[in-house]
Image (tube, grey):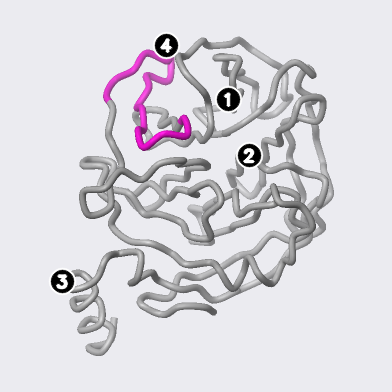
Amino acid sequence: MSRRLLLLASFCLVFLPLAFCADGYRIVHTYPHDPEAFTQGLIFINGQLYESTGLNGRSSLRMDDLETGKVLQRQDVPSQFFAEGLTNWGSTLVQLTWKAHIAFVYDRFSFRQLRTFPYEGEGWGLTQDGKNLILSDGSAELRFLNPETFAVVRRITVTDHGAPVKEINELEYIHGQIYANIWYSNKIARISPQTGKVLGWIDLSGLVASVVPQDQNAVLNGIAYDVQHDRLFVTGKLWPKLFEIKVVAGKAGR
């Protein structure tokens, strides 16, 4: 980081709330995305993009082709369930539901459902840190769950300068931090998994504006990280595009 950016970062940390010192982004590549997909969970594993889509009667588990946006493999979720967050664990995929208190566990390769797990409260976002699953439920709390039993291991409250950050949605674990969409916000929070404190914000307002969503529910929601090639992907509900971006420290816009 340049000396100028270091000084700016120091000024932000000392004098201004994090919301006013958000990092910006640069678009690396734009890919097509199914505009009918109500994106609730997004992950990238071993060269493959997986997606959980929501809405009753339209929920699904998908494997998408990154370059074309075409659905290569799909498992529809029974219509009584509203699918939510998605993550991987070993050779399985774990998919939340919104209000049914049930998570589905699938074989990652065949999409065959292996089992289900119950959990308390609503299910919104899901990720994992290599030890535990991490679940959001729309509140300011994140729950760390045993990946075999779904029992709660610990909880953290997400705060920014002492104030709780509510409506935490889709999650992704990147470089030891939890990246989180905030429902109806154009910013991604970077959260400490130890303390729950917001370490910074990524402002994607310009990117959201470029999509011109036609539906009020077409909000920013979907974060995936390609560990092998250090690529960050973002999209939104009902968006026709998926973006690969680079975070630009201390600079708004793109």
The answer to which of marks 4 and 3 sits earlier in the sequence is 3
> Relative to residue 27, is residue 240 depicted above or below?
above
Give SS at disc 1.
Answer: strand
For image coordinates 59% across by 47% down, the residue present is 44
Q: Nearer the viewer, mark 1 or mark 3?
A: 3
Tell me the residue that label 2 is attached to: 40
Q: Given the image, on which type of amino acid does mark 4 rest?
A: Thr
Tell me the residue that label 4 is attached to: 149
For image coordinates 34% across by 27% down, the residue present is 144
- Left or right, 173 with respect to 234, comes to left
Q: Nearer the viewer, mark 4 or mark 1?
A: 1
Residue 156 figure quarter: top left
Residue 67 figure quarter: bottom right
Tell me the residue that label 1 is attached to: 96
> Relative to residue 202, is residue 82 depicted above or below?
above
Give SS at disc 3.
Answer: helix
The answer to which of marks 2 and 4 sits earlier in the sequence is 2
Tell me the residue that label 3 is attached to: 14
Q: Nearer the viewer, mark 2 or mark 3?
A: 3
Q: Dot 2 surroundings within 10 Å: few (below 14), some, or many (20 or more)? A: many
Give how far across and how far down residue 107 sits, in percent.
65, 22
Q: Nearer the viewer, residue 15 or 178?
A: 15
> Relative to residue 248, is residue 93 depicted above or below?
above
**Range covered by the magenta-colored residues:** 137-154
Q: Given the image, on which type of amino acid does mark 1 rest?
A: Leu
Is disc 4 in contact with disc 3, using a CB cutoff of under 8 Å?
A: no
Marks 4 and 3, how far apart at CA: 43 Å
Q: Is residue 95 magenta?
A: no
Give how far across and how far down residue 16 sits, in percent.
24, 71
The answer to which of marks 2 and 1 sits earlier in the sequence is 2
